[in-house]
Image (tube, rainbow, N blue to C red):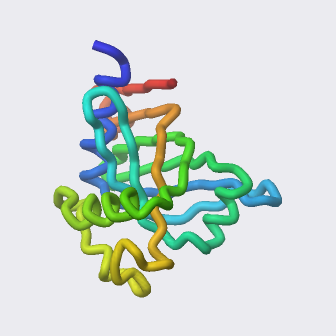
Amino acid sequence: MSPLSVTAPAFVDMAHRIVWATVATISPSGQPRTRVLHPIWEWDGDRLHGWIGTFPHSPKAADLAHDSRVSVTYWSPEQDTCTADCDSVWETSPDERSAAWDRFARGPEPVGYDPAMIPGWTSAESPEFGVLRLEPTRLRVFPGTMLLQGTGDVLTWSA
């Protein structure tokens, strides 16, 4: 079994349980910037992809135009943490935008949500609806039991 096939499902399980992630970018002036976002992850047995619905004209978009890399970190009060360092790509085709809209709307609980609840997002064609695809280059899953009790497995994978 490959390290990715062990780490990716554990990452998705933890990320989807925690739901909200701190996502870091680098601004054009070289400053780190963070914000809280709501990614959905898909593991198909071979590849892991993340998806974020976001505003395509935000300060984040300017950061990503400068440097497309992001770091996505989840934390729970039980001290569970997982991180995905990723390359990101804006999906702009109508088919990809529609697929992403459906992915968010039909996502598993508790990460699925109705994108139309976001002001300005009435459909996948809304100009304010942007789709950011995440391609992980490194994953780390760190159960809180490791920190608190010295038990559990820290999982890592790098492309």
Question: How many discs mark residues in the rendered view?
Answer: 0
Which residue does the image show at 25% across and 74% down from the upper left?
Answer: 114
Find residue 104 and report its horizontal and vertical position in percent: 28, 63
Q: Residue furthest top?
A: 1
User: In the figure, 150 relative to 95: above or below?
Assistant: above
Q: Residue furthest bottom?
A: 119
Is 78 situated left or right of 134 in this image?
Answer: left
Which residue does the image show at 47% across and 47% down from the upper left?
Answer: 134
Q: Quadrant of the N terminus?
A: top left
Is 141 situated left or right of 45 in this image?
Answer: right
Q: Quadrant of residue 26?
A: bottom right
Find residue 130 and report its horizontal and vertical position in percent: 48, 67
Find residue 13 and report its horizontal and vertical position in percent: 25, 42
Q: Residue furthest front?
A: 94
Find residue 38 and report its horizontal and vertical position in percent: 38, 62
- Front residue (pair 20, 148): 20
Is 49 situated left or right of 107 in this image?
Answer: right
User: In the figure, 58 relative to 93: above or below?
Assistant: below
Which residue does the image show at 31% across and 66% down from the upper left?
Answer: 101
- Front residue (pair 31, 97): 97
User: In the figure, 140 relative to 103: above or below?
Assistant: above
Which residue does the image show at 63% across and 55% down from the upper left?
Answer: 25
- Front residue (pair 20, 151): 20
